[in-house]
Amino acid sequence: MSTTPASPTWNPALYLRFADERTQPCRDLVVRLPPRAYQSIIDLGCGPGNSTAVLAAAFPTAQILGIDNSPDMLTRARADLPSLTFELATIESFSPAAPPDLLFSNAALQWVNPHEQIFPRLASLVAPTTADSPGGVFAMQMPYHLASPGHHQLRQQVTSAAWSTKYPATTDSFRFLTVPHYHELLAPHFRSVQIWTTTYHHLLPNHQSIVDWLSGTALLPWLNPLTPADRTAFLAEYFTRITAAYPLQSTGQVLFPFNRLFIIAER
């Protein structure tokens, strides 16, 4: 994109409207973790705590810390999971008191960049291998929208003549790296790096559901700077674009393909 969005303002209720669909990739990542006695776990970008709850259920004896940069998300996480610990912090600057056995992130690292710097830094935080310990694990998943119709339409809209003037111009926009590049960043720090992608085909009731889904995440930075009237106009145009991009099924529902990148790196 040739424009830069504002920082997102998170709405836990809107985000959790599709809680099951958003949490399923987290569950799929957890079941593929190497079997180890994880005693300390950090959930980077824990949001409203849906990923932290999955970790707590899988590793009930571990000490788990969730961190996020949104006070609203953390308020919801603390309300839903009062027995767990949560801390306000940014992924870019967070440093744990002690290296964790598992450094985990569910659908958060797409918001921080540049990945060329972030991923090696996160790798350095994981517990090292010692005579008494095999070392830690870094595990993450994030959206991986290299060819998503919805994100293509978003790029087209925010860079159009009607909308590009609403945002500050820059060439320093977020970009995903290739799978080989992520491997090159992590391989020097770990003995094993597994990377894979999965496309989830979410069956949603209608096109408005896609707009609602993305309004809780990808659209937020582009909606935040706008006036209420402009937000209404932006969403109306985006709904029209989404309707053209995703065909209806014979049931009247819509399949919403959502690609995600997974990484498990072991010391």
Image (cartoon, rainbow, N blue to C red):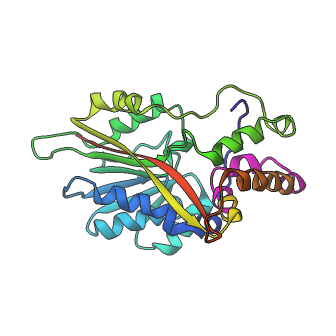
Is residue 218 on the magenta stretch?
A: yes
Task: Name which residue lies at 33% across and 55% down.
Answer: 41
Q: Where is residue 100? Give x, y as percent.
A: 30, 49
Q: Looking at the image, is 81 positioned above or below residue 122?
A: below
Quadrant occupied by the N terminus: top right
Q: Where is residue 82? Give x, y as percent.
A: 45, 73
Task: Name which residue lies at 67% across and 45% down.
Answer: 7
* Outermost right residue: 229
Q: Quadrant of residue 229?
A: bottom right
Q: Where is residue 18? Give x, y as percent.
A: 57, 67
Residue 153 visible, this angle: yes
Classified by dominant secondary structure, the portion drawn in magenta counts as helix
Who is closer to the viewer here, 29 or 44? 29
Task: Name which residue lies at 46% across and 48% down.
Answer: 260
Who is closer to the viewer here, 85 or 180? 180
Residue 16 visible, this angle: no
Who is closer to the viewer here, 9 or 244? 244
Q: Quadrant of residue 84?
A: bottom left
Q: Where is residue 40? Give x, y as percent.
A: 29, 56
Task: Name which residue lies at 50% across and 58% down.
Answer: 201
* Outermost left residue: 131
Q: How many marks?
A: 0
Is residue 44 on the magenta stretch?
A: no
Q: Looking at the image, is 83 positioned above or below residue 33?
A: below
In the displayed structure, does residue 192 sit left or right of residue 169? left
Instruction: Give the residues in magenta.
Output: 212-231
Who is closer to the viewer here, 90 or 237? 237
In the displayed structure, does residue 251 sit left or right of residue 185? right
In the displayed structure, does residue 102 sit left or right of residue 169? left
Quadrant occupied by the C terminus: top left
